[in-house]
Image (cartoon, grey):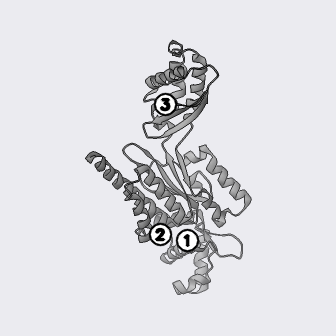
Amino acid sequence: MLGERQKNILKEIVLEYIKKARPVGSQSLCKKFKVSSATIRNDMLVLENLGYLEKQHISSGRIPSEKGYRYYVDHLMEPSKISGEDMLKLQTIFSNNELDLDSAIEKSLEIISDITNYTSVILGSASKENLLQKVEVVPISPGVVVAIVITDKGHVTNKQITLPEGIDIKEVQKTSELLNKMLFGTPLDLVPSKLEFEIKPIIGNYVTNYEVLYNAFYEALSNFQTDRDVRWNGKANILKQPEFSTVDDVKNIISKFESKDLVSKIEETDDEVKVYIGKETSLDDNVTVIKTKYKTSDKEGTLAIIGPKRMDYERVLNLLEYIKSRIEKKEVRDGKAREEE
């Protein structure tokens, strides 16, 4: 059980370290708490022994531990409102009628990356949550077409298909018509098995050169199941933080940002804004991820801010809370505008 002064000392060390990224010594806390350096050192030792503070070097001051940050977020951080300056920047985005909701969300995360120097990511729905709505085929040159896949969540992606010589474009279009008829409403992760067991046995009844066309579309559509709508902003921002100063640190975090398996761990299922620190992130022990689920009438996904454990927790929480509220308001406003049209 922490005493009141010990709680305040921990809070002050967290805030000071967030601001300056330097260990905090007892001398800098004496004036604020109006007690002797020995008293402060004793309280800091108690906090260290309890696991809330740690030393980088024997003679250095203290820095918050992972446990210390967690205690700060859960018990010491005081609720506050988003600053007027931050609010104005985001209001400009969400009040812009030229931007649809999806664009407004993306622009707002860009702004958060710019003003915080952290990395932001918008993680769209997983392939199993996307239902295939339509496959369109667009010829772009002789023997080359682009297959465009559209999902019910509004996700649009494409794959280029190179066709063997002698394949008539009309046969390609017949194949896409068959796919649309039989795959409509299928979750993307189930598309490959449906192609194999339902379409492959009958495609020869509809088109000639069916083996070639089946193989081409199977390869293209199977790849879609692993694709996910992931939009990054400020990937390099994390590298500006002193915690990532060595070549190994840089290589490690960049490789994790590029890993599809690890990126999927960013997904959030809770509607509240949640804070994950260090090991809790399942991404990297040296980062904090603050994230939340967002949902509109036709889309859902995760908004996340990634920074060092020495993150400005209060500011980022306020920014994400504000964006969530603006998403709901903009969707209602845009919906009314469409009805009036």
* Residue 286 image point, x, y percent: 62, 59
At 67% from the left and 50% from the top, the residue drawn is 255
Identify the image quadrant of residue 66.
bottom right
Name the residue type under label 3: Glu
55, above or below 328, in the image? below
Binning the other alpha carbons within 10 Å of mark 2 as few (below 14), some (14 to 19) or many (20 upward) gives: some
**Residue topped by disc 1:** 14
Rounded to the nearest angstrom, the CA distance separating label 1 from label 3 is 54 Å
Comparing marks 1 and 3, which lies closer to the viewer?
Answer: 3
Q: Nearer the viewer, residue 85 or 68?
A: 85
Whether residues under marks 3 and 2 lie with C-beta atoms below 8 angstroms apart, the answer is no
74, above or below 220, in the image? below
**Residue topped by disc 2:** 76
Name the residue type under label 2: Leu
SS for callout 1: helix
**Residue topped by disc 3:** 136
